[in-house]
Image (tube, grey):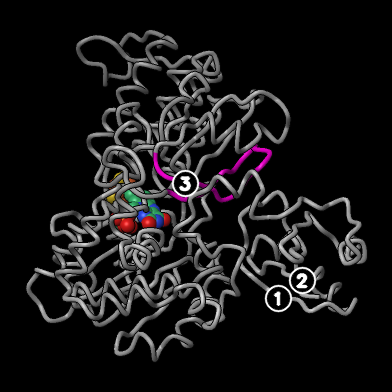
């Protein structure tokens, strides 16, 4: 009997190795596969297509004799899996991550073979036609970026895969790297062929040891297939700002992870001063499907308006059914949080969701009809970012979460520009004052700097107005989105839950 158990790090953290040993001891053959992405059911066991989870060693014999109460029926028909449109995660749960045989058997390398028979220009035209936009946060069209690099003068060009995945509540990059590393490698090889790059780097954080090990092993296994492209994994120390593309390039070059001013764009002067494509893991991993026969048109037919294709959404935080949900753009938060996610894990009412990581706005249930679409989110002063959806219940103190956003910015700031470096620290102080109701004496009059100038107590309303003004300064005066977007969670919390700031 063949038993399939994931070796994804989430499954490992929940005891998948011990469970696998238990099945082996009972005489079963265990295959270690990628995760289906139903996190609340991990470690999930699959026997002849039927799922059992979350399982422990104590459940082994009941699962093997088919009497276990953990039976969830056929996994492919599960209500969390069946409605998904999995293109990037088509192999999730189905293949052994480091098996070249499984990869080939499921269409692997066909996009690369097709791309290699085409000119770089033709490949870029298909990427542009697919409507693919960067999945790392900014949603910039991938085809335009690739075209800029391809047309840039210079013999040495690079492709850099941004696998830093620093956003709270996100794990899709990690799942892809651990579960389907050849797909990322294939996407990078297609990109390198299209833009004329000789070297590709995958930059990820040292907190992802399983992903790093899988990628390195997969690169070794695929070396002959992607030759003469040279590919390497580079590890960062986990600073949030090292996910920002220019700071990431500095980090790969061995420098401190400080943001570079733009221009020049990395597409023209990136790694070691050479034209460089920087794309997120999910952007690159979408490429093999897009380059398969008819793939670009199929991709472009999904989604809404200018948000085309599918988006791997990560349901996290206080949610009953957390995990990876890939679907076409346009799905509402209501469907994601209630229908798919099952509401909160605590059973209490949902108070808010934060979409798009630590810089994303807090969205109240009254706005849960918002469709997953870059432009619709921008109009609502919100962010899609990397597609992390973090749920909090009604016990959350939104004033405290707003303070956390400012503090996060203060801690993670690279320090290059004043609105972020100083503004975030002043923002934390201001929020503390507002929240404890402390009065500050402001000097008034013509010469307020004089120590004996008359003073008046600042009211809470004045402190809030000052916080709003500070947020405006950070929004428009910061060099990168860390300082520039921190006002989103702060101001959205203030706007929708003013009572939490009293
Ligand atoms: C503070 C900060 C952190 C970021 N972190 C990430 C990250 O972890 N992963 C990522 O792909 N993009 C991140 N980005 C966005 C990158 O700067 C860049 O836009 C992205 O890698 C481009 O790839 P894409 O077009 O495929 O999205 C971050 C940006 C900022 C300002
Ligand atoms: S906004 Fe913050 S992280 Fe970005 S460049 Fe300025 S100081 Fe650095």
Q: Main secondary structure of the magenta part?
A: strand
Question: In the image, 210: left or right of 43?
Answer: left
- The stretch in magenta equals 311-329
- The residue at the point 13 percent across, 55 percent down is 263
- The residue at the point 44 percent across, 17 percent down is 440
Between discs 1 and 2, the one toward the N terminus: 2
Q: Could you tell me if the residues under marks 1 and 3 are in contact, i.e. CB atoms within 8 Å? A: no
Q: Could you tell me if the residues under marks 1 and 2 are in contact, i.e. CB atoms within 8 Å? A: yes
Q: Could you tell me if the residues under marks 3 and 2 are in contact, i.e. CB atoms within 8 Å? A: no
Q: Which residue is mark 3?
A: 327
Picture coordinates of residue 344, whole percent (x, y): 67, 32
Kind of element beneath mark 3: strand
Between discs 1 and 3, the one toward the N terminus: 1
Q: Quadrant of the C terminus?
A: top right
Kind of element beneath mark 2: strand
Q: Quadrant of residue 469?
A: top left
Q: Which residue is mark 1?
A: 31
- The residue at the point 53 percent across, 24 percent down is 399
Picture coordinates of residue 350, whole percent (x, y): 61, 26
Q: Work out whether residue 294 or residue 344 is closer to the camera in this orientation and state it.
A: 294
Q: Which residue is mark 2?
A: 3
Of the numbered discs in the image, which one, if any, rests on residue 97? none
- Residue 375 visible in rendering: yes
Question: Where 206 falls versus 131 (above or below)?
Answer: below
Picture coordinates of residue 272, whole percent (x, y): 21, 74
Picture coordinates of residue 497, whole percent (x, y): 51, 17
């Amino acid at each position: 009997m063949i038993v399939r158990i994931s070796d994804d790090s989430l499954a490992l953290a929940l005891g998948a190795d011990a469970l696998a040993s238990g099945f082996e001891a009972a005489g079963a053959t265990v295959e270690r596969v990628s995760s289906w992405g139903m996190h609340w059911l991990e470690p999930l066991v699959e026997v002849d297509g039927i799922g059992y989870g979350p399982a422990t060693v104590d459940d082994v014999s009941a699962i093997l004799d088919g009497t276990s109460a953990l039976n969830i029926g056929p996994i492919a028909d599960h209500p969390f899996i069946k409605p998904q449109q999995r293109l990037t995660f088509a192999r999730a749960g189905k293949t052994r991550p480091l098996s070249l045989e499984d990869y080939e058997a499921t269409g692997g390398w066909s996009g690369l073979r097709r791309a290699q028979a085409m000119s770089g220009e033709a490949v870029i035209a298909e990427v542009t036609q697919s409507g693919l936009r960067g999945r790392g946060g900014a949603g910039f069209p991938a085809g335009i970026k690739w075209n800029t690099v391809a047309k840039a003068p210079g013999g040495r060009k690079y492709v850099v895969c941004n696998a830093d995945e620093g956003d709270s509540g996100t794990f899709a990059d990690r799942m892809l790297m651990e579960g389907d590393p050849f797909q990322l490698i294939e996407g990078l090889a297609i990109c390198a062929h299209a833009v004329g790059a000789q070297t590709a780097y995958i930059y990820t954080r040292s907190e992802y040891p399983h992903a790093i090990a899988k990628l390195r092993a997969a690169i070794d296994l695929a070396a002959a297939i992607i030759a003469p492209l040279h590919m390497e994994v580079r590890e960062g120390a986990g600073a949030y700002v090292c996910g920002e593309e220019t700071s990431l390039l500095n980090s790969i070059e061995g420098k401190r992870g400080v943001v570079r001013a733009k221009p020049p764009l990395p597409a023209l002067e990136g790694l070691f001063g050479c034209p460089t494509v920087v794309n997120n893991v999910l952007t690159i991993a979408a490429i093999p499907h897009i380059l398969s026969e008819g793939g670009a048109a199929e991709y472009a037919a999904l989604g809404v308006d200018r948000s085309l294709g599918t988006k791997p959404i990560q349901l996290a935080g206080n949610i009953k059914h957390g995990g990876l949900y890939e679907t076409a753009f346009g799905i509402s938060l209501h469907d994601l949080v209630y229908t798919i996610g099952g509401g909160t894990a605590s059973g209490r009412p949902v108070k808010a969701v934060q979409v798009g990581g630590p810089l994303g706005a807090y969205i109240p249930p009254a706005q849960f009809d918002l469709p997953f679409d870059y432009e619709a989110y921008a109009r609502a002063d919100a962010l899609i970012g990397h597609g992390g959806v973090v749920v909090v219940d009604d016990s959350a103190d939104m004033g405290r979460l707003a303070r956390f956003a400012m503090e996060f910015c203060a801690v993670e700031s690279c320090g290059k520009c004043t609105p972020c470096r100083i503004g975030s620290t002043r923002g934390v102080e201001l929020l503390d004052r507002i929240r404890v109701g402390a009065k500050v004496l402001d000097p008034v009059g013509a010469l307020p700097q004089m120590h004996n100038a008359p003073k008046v107590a600042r009211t809470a309303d004045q402190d809030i107005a000052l916080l709003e003004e500070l947020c405006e300064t950070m929004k428009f005066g910061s060099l990168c989105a860390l300082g520039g977007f921190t006002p989103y969670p702060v101001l959205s919390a203030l706007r929708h839950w003013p009572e939490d700031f009293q």
